[in-house]
Protein backbone atom coordinates (compact mmCIF):
# COMPACT_ATOMS: atom_id res chain seq x y z
CA UNK A 1 0.00 0.00 0.00
CA UNK A 2 1.33 3.43 -0.87
CA UNK A 3 2.38 5.82 1.88
CA UNK A 4 1.72 9.58 2.05
CA UNK A 5 -0.47 9.49 -1.06
CA UNK A 6 -3.56 11.71 -0.85
CA UNK A 7 -6.87 9.99 -1.44
CA UNK A 8 -8.37 10.67 -4.86
CA UNK A 9 -11.93 11.95 -4.75
CA UNK A 10 -14.00 10.36 -7.50
CA UNK A 11 -16.64 12.48 -9.21
CA UNK A 12 -18.99 10.97 -11.75
CA UNK A 13 -18.62 12.86 -15.04
CA UNK A 14 -22.16 12.43 -16.39
CA UNK A 15 -23.51 15.86 -17.26
CA UNK A 16 -20.30 17.78 -16.58
CA UNK A 17 -18.89 19.97 -19.33
CA UNK A 18 -15.62 21.32 -20.63
CA UNK A 19 -15.94 24.96 -21.70
CA UNK A 20 -14.14 26.49 -24.65
CA UNK A 21 -14.51 29.70 -26.61
CA UNK A 22 -13.89 31.32 -29.95
CA UNK A 23 -14.47 34.81 -31.34
CA UNK A 24 -18.00 36.23 -31.04
CA UNK A 25 -20.09 36.03 -34.23
CA UNK A 26 -23.03 38.10 -35.43
CA UNK A 27 -26.22 36.07 -35.74
CA UNK A 28 -27.85 36.10 -39.18
CA UNK A 29 -30.96 34.44 -40.58
CA UNK A 30 -31.06 32.21 -43.67
CA UNK A 31 -31.47 35.33 -45.87
CA UNK A 32 -28.31 36.95 -44.49
CA UNK A 33 -30.15 39.53 -42.36
CA UNK A 34 -28.42 40.42 -39.08
CA UNK A 35 -30.36 39.97 -35.84
CA UNK A 36 -30.55 43.27 -33.92
CA UNK A 37 -32.33 44.43 -30.79
CA UNK A 38 -34.86 47.33 -30.79
CA UNK A 39 -32.01 49.83 -30.30
CA UNK A 40 -30.19 48.56 -33.40
CA UNK A 41 -27.45 46.71 -31.52
CA UNK A 42 -26.23 43.50 -33.14
CA UNK A 43 -27.11 40.28 -31.33
CA UNK A 44 -24.04 38.04 -31.18
CA UNK A 45 -23.15 34.47 -30.40
CA UNK A 46 -20.49 34.81 -27.70
CA UNK A 47 -18.58 31.81 -29.03
CA UNK A 48 -18.72 29.87 -25.75
CA UNK A 49 -19.12 26.14 -26.29
CA UNK A 50 -19.89 23.53 -23.65
CA UNK A 51 -18.78 20.01 -24.55
CA UNK A 52 -20.21 17.19 -22.45
CA UNK A 53 -17.55 15.02 -20.82
CA UNK A 54 -18.39 11.35 -21.47
CA UNK A 55 -18.87 9.00 -18.54
CA UNK A 56 -15.76 7.08 -17.50
CA UNK A 57 -15.83 3.49 -16.32
CA UNK A 58 -13.40 2.91 -13.48
CA UNK A 59 -12.14 -0.35 -12.08
CA UNK A 60 -10.21 -0.78 -8.87
CA UNK A 61 -6.77 -2.37 -9.24
CA UNK A 62 -6.09 -4.57 -6.20
CA UNK A 63 -2.90 -5.96 -7.69
CA UNK A 64 -0.65 -3.48 -5.85
Image (tube, helix red, strand yellow):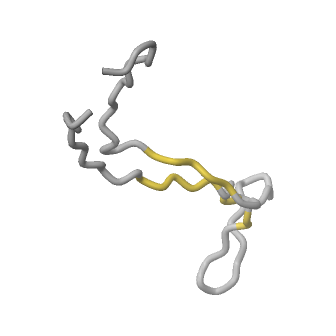
Residue 24: x and y, percent? 74, 60
Expressed as whole percent of the image width and height from the top left, the position of residue 33 reads 70, 78
Q: Count the numbered circles shown.
A: 0
Q: Nearer the viewer, residue 39 or 50?
A: 50
Q: Quadrant of the N terminus?
A: top left
In which quadrant of the rendered view does residue 44 lie?
bottom right
Give me the residue at 30% from left, 44% from top: 14
Residue lying at 59% horizontally and 84% vertically, measured from the top left: 30
Left or right for 40, reference 49: right
Residue at 23 percent across and 38 percent down: it is 61
* Vertical side of 5 occupied by 48: above or below: below
Residue displayed at 57% across by 56% down: 49
Left or right: where 53 falls relative to 55: right
Find residue 25 and report its image quarter.
bottom right
Query: Between 8 and 47, which is closer to the camera in this rendering?
Result: 8
Q: Position of residue 45 (x, y in %)?
A: 66, 59
Q: In this view of the protein, which residue sits in the foreground, 37 or 50?
A: 50
Which quarter shows the C terminus? Answer: top left
Farthest residue toward the right?
Answer: 40
Left or right: 36 with respect to 11?
right
* Residue that extends furthest to the bottom in the rendered view of this protein: 31
Q: Is residue 51 left or right of residue 22?
A: left
Q: Quadrant of residue 63?
A: top left
**Residue 13: image x %, image y %?**
34, 42
Amino acid sequence: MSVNTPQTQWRETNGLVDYGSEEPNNIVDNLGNFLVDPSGNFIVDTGVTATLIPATVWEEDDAL
